[in-house]
Amino acid sequence: MGFGDLKSSSGLKVLNDFLTDRSFIEGYVPSQADVAVFDAITAPPPADLCHALRWYNHIKSYQAQKNSLPGVKKPLGQYGPAGVADTTSASPAASKDEDDDDDIDLFGSDEEEDTEAAKLKEQRLAEYAAKKAKKPALIAKSSILLDVKPWDDETDMAKLEECVRSIQMDGLVWGQSKLVPVGYGIKKLQISCVVEDDKVGTDILEEQITAFEDYVQSMDVAAFNKI
């Protein structure tokens, strides 16, 4: 299929004969088929090719809205009478434009793309590292419940608690306390605290609490929970 060379008089005559009993290239309304053929013609057909000229002027009136016409634009070789091949060549101007386009690298070389990608990756890694550095590190903490036992029922428990709470160190926060009966009138001090695991351990707590040997007999860990 085709019209031959639509830039030649012979091609325009094929088009004229094709349109003798047709208003449009395809169907009964203007479509992208008409746009494709119209765009291939560089000048209006001569007056003696009346059918082609009538069609040309009709389609020309749709130029403002040609992109909205129905259908899909196909190659010229898919329109026209059977048995005629399309030989329409691109115009010199179009060819020159295409040659000029070949000289323009719209997308850049692969090397440029790789360089840009590497720079972007480095930038994102740097942003991530900076963001991570600003984020405070997670501090591991534990909640501990201690049982501090006195020597006997005559031990001053208020003074014993005062001694225990006097222990101050980085990463140690004392909490609530109470006296718990253990028998024979003796009460033990049960006291809670929160510690930072990297700074305070139960061993150092036991060492410092039992150092008050006038009041403290022993210390045990009643409960230990990670926070």
Image (spheres, helix red, strand yellow):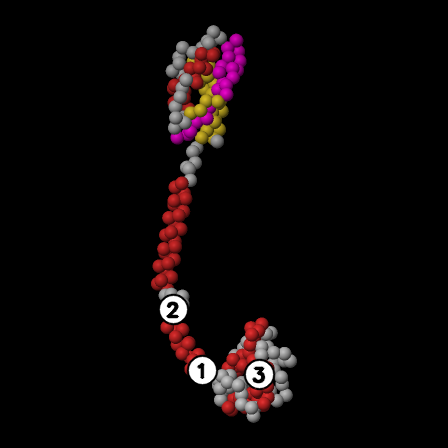
Residue 105 disc label: 2
Residue that badge 3 annotates: 57
Is residue 50 among what the camera can see?
A: yes
Q: Main secondary structure of the magenta part?
A: strand
Instruction: Give the alpha-carbon distance from disc 2 to disc 1, as whole Å.
Output: 23 Å
Q: Secondary structure at mark 2?
A: loop
Q: Earlier in the sequence, mark 2 or mark 1?
A: 1
Residue drawn at point x = 45 percent, y = 81 percent: 90
Q: Nearer the viewer, mark 2 or mark 1?
A: 1
Q: Secondary structure at mark 3?
A: helix
Query: What segment carries the magenta color?
Result: 176-198
Three-letter code for the amino acid on which mark 2 is drawn? Asp
Is 174 above or below relative to 155?
below
Q: Which residue is mark 1?
A: 91
Q: Quadrant of residue 170?
A: top left
Of callouts 2 and 3, the N-terminal one: 3
Image coordinates of residue 137 in percent, x first then y, are: 41, 37
Q: How far apart, in angstroms, are the residues tagged by discs 2 and 3?
A: 39 Å
